[in-house]
Amino acid sequence: GPDPTAAASAQIQLVRGEVASITADKGGMSRVVLKDAAAAKVCSDTAEVDKFDGTSLESMRIIYKQSCVDSPATKNAPLLVSTVEVAKIKPGALVVATTNGTKGAIVRVVVGDKVVQLGADRLANTSGDPLTK
């Protein structure tokens, strides 16, 4: 028979963006506003060889020609997520979330070059060698 989860999963989208603001809403929820994504150029390798890079046969690699298309700017709708999930998130953090159009769930939060949160779980901030502590 048909997969009953297929219709539900088709409505779930993955959104990425930089947090512009977070405001408290009712019922233990918070409204997360993401900055709109800017227009960009999206490139991918083709099957056509452009050149070879390297000085010897062992270090040589193939560089393929690229095909590029313009990706228009996209408008991000605000997300309604549990306040627990965004308790430690500040504007400027990069967020990956799932959404059904209005309600969402935080998947990952990146600050700088470090993943600081997975779902609602915040990761410990560690530095140095953990075996010497």
Image (spheres, grey):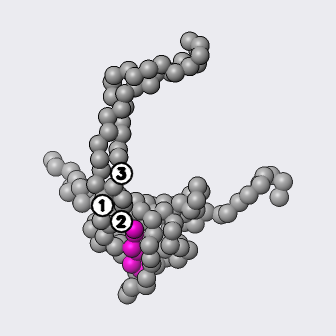
Discs 3, 1 touching: Cβ within 8 Å: no
Question: SS class of the residue under badge 2?
Answer: loop
Of the two numbered discs 3 and 1 in the rendering, the one whose residue sits closer to the viewer: 3
Task: Give, as a single range, the part of the protein colored magenta.
Answer: 30-36
Question: SS class of the residue under badge 1?
Answer: loop
Instruction: State the mark number for residue 36.
Output: 2
Query: Quick check: 23 left or right of 110?
Result: left
Instruction: State the mark number for residue 21.
Output: none
Residue that carries the numbered disc 3 in the rendered image: 40
Label 3 or label 1, whichever comes before in sequence order = 3
Q: Amino acid at mark 2?
A: Asp
Dominant SS type (magenta):
strand
Q: Position of residue 77 (x, y in %)?
A: 31, 70
Of the two numbered discs 2 and 3 in the rendering, the one whose residue sits closer to the viewer: 3
Q: Position of residue 28 (x, y in %)?
A: 42, 83
Q: Amino acid at mark 3?
A: Ala
Q: Amino acid at mark 1?
A: Thr
Residue 98 falls in which quadrant of the image? bottom left
Question: Does 32 lie within the magenta span?
Answer: yes
Instruction: State the mark number for residue 74.
Output: 1
CA separation in Å, label 1 and label 2: 6 Å
Q: Position of residue 99 (x, y in %)?
A: 33, 65
Discs 1, 2 touching: Cβ within 8 Å: yes
